Image (spheres, rainbow, N blue to C red):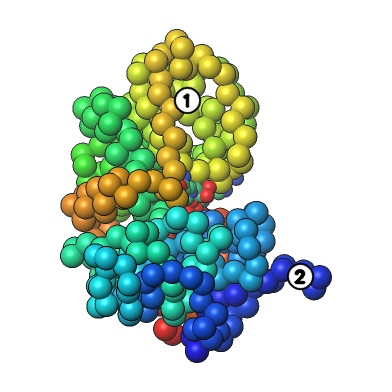
């Protein structure tokens, strides 16, 4: 038997609970993992609370991330005893996920745990941090360099945002952090933000073009915020669009793209090819200061997951939450 968060949906409604499950109930897969840590991402919050259509099959064990040790494997290249990380691939959405003490998965989905990180640190990074890294890699690919000027991070106190601030600062960028929580200014400056600004300036409908300011941007918010960020990019700047915390809509004009050569780079962590994942994790080992990671991280046990998921969606959680699934 193992403990897991279980989401059910039937005539009694949509609900999540801490359950004891039989290993025989685990889904098909060629690798069984003894999970050490998982984490809570925005998407896990949507799944657990039922506030977003994340779960595609019921009952579901949520958790789009996990880190642990391979217990049994029939997959070539994955051996019992290997330390592994999993992010995405629809796990926690259509296949039982990481908010559990055991998981059965496809070996192709697993990435070796980088030597630089413990399982807990890998989950402090999680999909949020690995997505932040994919966003930074997209800016680099489009030629955004520290000497080009200020780089904006929206939703800066969130999981993706706070890791993006830390990575960009470590790489020498001048980072401006946009947040609705000005009381966390000291925290954002400790991560490396040069300036902290109020997210309200991006929240409402804006003009097609605004004063040019940002050489690059990592946007986790979408909607009017993303439209206004695009409108205030400098000539040939790049925005990496990662999230939808304000909304899924994009009420923008083409003006920044056709008049200023702005690039909008889409970031998807879920189905990102394996080579890009391996690169992102290798670069995280180099570009993320683990002391800053610790500043971002708080820890809970499986029994606190459901309450924390509600707080996360209410914007009350700062940084990253790791889940020790064995307490
Ligand atoms: P968090 O909940 O940790 O952070 C989201 C942050 O967005 C909040 O902390 C808040 O930052 C800001 N925010 C929340 N509501 C609003 C609002 N109404 N208007 C403006 N800003 C708001 O989530 P994550 O960091 O885990 O994820 C961020 C987004 O990225 C989510 O939409 C998530 O679905 C998406 N995502 C996408 C991935 C991909 O593959 N593309 C992978 C991972 C996440 P503050 O308090 O600083 O204002």
Q: Residue furthest top?
A: 259
Is residue 197 visible from the viewing direction of this image?
Answer: no
Q: Which residue matches tag 1?
A: 230
Q: Residue at x 24, y 48 (%)?
A: 279
Q: Residue at x 48, y 76 (%)?
A: 100
Of tags 1 and 2, the one toward the viewer is 2
3D distance between C-alphas at marks 1 and 2: 43 Å
Q: Is residue 258 above or below residue 288?
A: above
- The residue sitting at 40% across, 64% down in the picture is 106
- Residue 27: percent from the left, percent from the top? 51, 72
Q: Are marks 1 and 2 in contact (CB under 8 Å)?
A: no
Residue 51 position, x and y percent, is: 67, 57
Q: Residue furthest bottom?
A: 1
Circle nearer the N terminus (1, 2):
2
- Secondary structure found at label 1: helix
Q: Quadrant of the C terminus?
A: bottom left
Residue 177 pos. (x, y %): 40, 42
Q: Which residue is mark 2?
A: 10
State the count of labels: 2
Q: Nearer the viewer, residue 188 or 264?
A: 264
| Residue 97 seen in this snapshot | yes
Quadrant in which residue 87 is drawn:
bottom left
Q: Secondary structure at mark 2?
A: strand
Quadrant of residue 316 in the image? bottom right
Q: Residues within 10 Å of mark 1 (few under 14, many from 20)?
A: many
In the image, residue 209 lies at what x, y percent?
51, 16
């Amino acid at each position: 038997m193992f403990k897991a968060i279980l989401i059910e949906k039937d005539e009694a409604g949509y609900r999540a609970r801490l359950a004891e499950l039989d290993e025989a109930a685990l889904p098909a897969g060629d690798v069984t993992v003894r999970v050490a840590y998982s984490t809570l991402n925005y998407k896990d919050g949507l799944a657990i609370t039922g506030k977003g259509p994340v779960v595609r099959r019921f009952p579901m064990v949520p958790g789009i991330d996990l880190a642990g040790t391979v217990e049994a494997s029939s997959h070539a290249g994955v051996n019992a005893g290997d330390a592994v990380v999993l992010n995405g691939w629809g796990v926690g959405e259509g296949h039982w996920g990481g908010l559990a003490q055991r998981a059965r998965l496809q070996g192709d989905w697993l990435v070796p745990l980088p030597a630089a990180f413990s399982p807990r640190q890998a989950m402090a990074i999680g999909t949020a941090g690995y997505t932040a890294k994919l966003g930074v890699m997209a800016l680099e690919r489009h030629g955004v360099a520290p000497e080009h000027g200020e780089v904006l991070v929206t939703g800066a106190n969130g999981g993706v945002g706070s890791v993006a601030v830390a990575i960009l600062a470590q790489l020498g960028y001048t980072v401006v952090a946009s947040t609705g929580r000005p009381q966390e200014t000291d925290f954002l400056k400790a991560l490396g933000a040069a300036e902290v600004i109020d997210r309200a300036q991006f929240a409402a409908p804006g003009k097609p073009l605004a004063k040019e300011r940002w050489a690059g941007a990592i946007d986790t918010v979408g909607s009017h915020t993303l439209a206004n960020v695009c409108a205030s990019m400098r000539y040939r700047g790049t925005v990496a669009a990662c999230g939808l915390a304000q909304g899924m809509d994009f009420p923008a004009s083409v003006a920044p793209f056709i008049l200023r050569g702005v690039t909008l780079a889409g970031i998807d962590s879920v189905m990102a090819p394996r080579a890009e994942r391996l690169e992102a994790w290798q670069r995280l080992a180099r570009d993320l200061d683990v002391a800053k990671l610790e500043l971002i991280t708080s820890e809970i046990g499986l029994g606190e997951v459901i309450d924390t998921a509600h707080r996360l969606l209410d914007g009350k959680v700062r940084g990253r939450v790791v889940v020790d699934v064995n307490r």
